[in-house]
Image: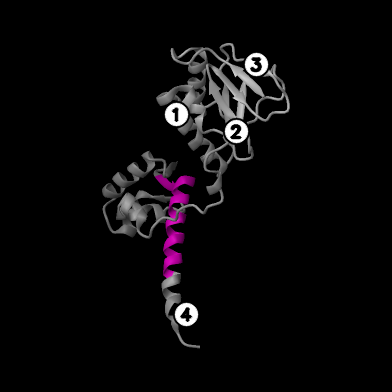
Amino acid sequence: MSSYHADPFGSRPGWARATTQRFVSGDVWYPQRPGADRARDDTTYRARQLATGGARRLFADVHPNLSWNDGVLSIAEMISHDTVAAAGRGLLLVPSIFAYKPVPPLDPDEPPSLGYPSRGIATLWAPPPQPKPGALVDLLGRTRALLLQMLEEPLPTVELARRLKVTPGAVSQHLQVLHATGLLTRDRDRRQVLYRRTPIGDRLTTDATATKAKRTSQTMAGPEQRRPA
């Protein structure tokens, strides 16, 4: 069994403050998605457990091999039998989609840390929810949704207004909102400003378009599938 010794938690000592600061400052390294989402969700959950119930609640459901008692975090079923004093250094918690049990540092002299199975691993390979048809219009409004779909290539305000059959001033107001929210970029080309979708705008538009196309394809295929052989 391995143990971490810390001061009693009731008065929010250095161990608790250091742990909370590590949650807030983002010391945990997040891999690329989808594991990043699980690690982030787990860290948020642990921070809430710590804030509302202290260390006992924080470690209560991390893993059956973990136990917290009188300021000591113990790990059962370990090959080594080391005892490490946190001594104000805090404890870095590292949720992992690869760990199946608590993982302390290999060397007792290393800074205190604890790897453990992240919450939500069972949903790791679940497909992400698909946007509903018309969701982009519901989110942005019809005009802004059309502008975002049109700006796959750089276009000036005048051309956009011509295509939408509205005034350049009206288009400019919508473009300013889309640009302010990070969905469009703008670059000056001589006397005109060209707008174009950002990668975030591309993703938003592509997801909505793909969902609409899939729904249309299924609707068109319906009668064929019901037709007798």
- Front-most of 147 and 145? 145
Q: Quickly name the residue at label 4.
A: 225
Q: Position of residue 40 (x, y in %)?
A: 50, 35
Circles 4 and 1: CB distance less than 8 Å? Answer: no
Q: Cβ–Cβ below 8 Å for labels 3 and 2?
A: no
Which numbered dot is residue 212? none
Instruction: Please state which of the two labelled residues, at mark 4 or mark 2, is closer to the viewer.
Output: 2
Query: Magenta part of the protein: which range?
Result: 193-216
**Circle 3: residue type:** Val
Q: Secondary structure at mark 3?
A: strand
Q: Which residue is mark 3?
A: 84
User: Does label 3 or label 4 sit earlier along the sequence?
Assistant: 3
Which SS type dominates the magenta stretch?
helix
Q: Is residue 176 left or right of residue 104?
A: left
Q: Compute the Cα span from label 4 to label 1.
A: 52 Å
Residue placed most toward the observer, 195 or 51? 51
* Residue for badge 2: 116
Residue 5 visible somewhere in the drawing: yes
Q: Amino acid at mark 2?
A: Tyr
